[in-house]
Image: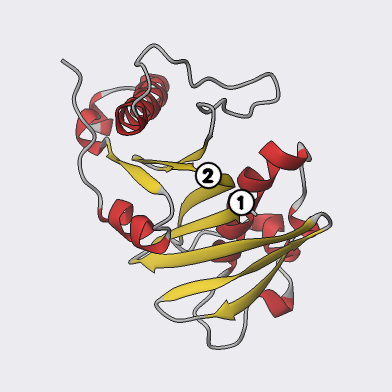
Amino acid sequence: MDLPLEKHPVVGKLQELLPEVKIFGGTFRSWLPDPHSIGSEERLKVLSDAKLKAVDLCIGEIKIAIGVSSQFDIHRGSDGDRQWPPGYMGSITHKGTVELAAIAKNIKSVGIDLERDDGKSLGNIRDLVGLNEIPAGSGISSHMIFSVKESVFKAQFPITKKKLGFGDIKIVWKHVGTQFRGEAVLPTGRIEVRAGTLDKWIYTCALIKSE
């Protein structure tokens, strides 16, 4: 019998941030053996297998929630974009041992992303964050901008089929506080973005509503 994903508080927080969409997921940390008990190559394989299993569990929960057959194949197309059931759009993300999935009906597209601001450098990506994208005293970090743009990539691709760079997207914030809301400005238009934090976790989303 497959083990379920364990609850993780970021699932509820993302659901609060994005009530238009149903959020699924959790953590598979308890599935993993003591990292000191296995070699580095085996550890990477165990982690990779666990992530794939977690994705399958999230997709299984989605199928039950929206009432589609368990045999329906929510697979990736030739362009890497996941093929959601007709009338639905979704998104999947993971960070570490946490896996999240989103699904919604009657929207154009959605993208979600999860990151941890653990103080590690973002390298060259930091140079692509515009000065105006991080208002002084807002609590917004380079990691949050990175995460928001990842969400935007995922939301816009099913519609435009364009692989954008970080420099192609500018984030304009309209509200900062316990939740952050704004717009992503792209060559093709604007997309609503939202973000929140929980300890070191950063969870973000990009939403394109039906007109």
Assign a secondary structure to mark 2. Answer: loop
Q: Is residue 124 left or right of residue 199?
A: right
CB atoms of marks 1 and 2 within 8 Å: yes
Which of 156/50 is in front? 156
**Can residue 50 be seen from the camera position used here?**
yes
**Residue at numbered disc 2:** 106
* The label number, if any, that marks residue 199 in the structure image: none
How was this image coloured?
secondary structure
User: Where does the image place residue 11, in percent across and percent down from the top left?
Assistant: 31, 51
Q: Residues within 10 Å of mark 1 (few under 14, many from 20)?
A: few
User: Where does the image place residue 196, in percent across and percent down from the top left?
Assistant: 43, 67
Residue visible at 50% across and 73% down?
180
Which of 165/57 is in front? 57
Q: Is residue 153 left or right of residue 70?
A: right
* Quadrant of image for the C terminus: bottom right
Gap in angstroms between the C-alphas marked 1 and 2: 6 Å
Q: Residues within 10 Å of mark 2 (few under 14, many from 20)?
A: few
Amino acid bearing label 1: Ser
The image shows residue 188, relative to residue 103, as above or below, that is: below
Residue visible at 37% across and 19% down?
42
* Residue 157 position by quadrant: top right
| Upstream in sequence: badge 1 or badge 2 | 2
Q: Is residue 130 left or right of residue 48?
A: right
**Residue at numbered disc 1:** 210
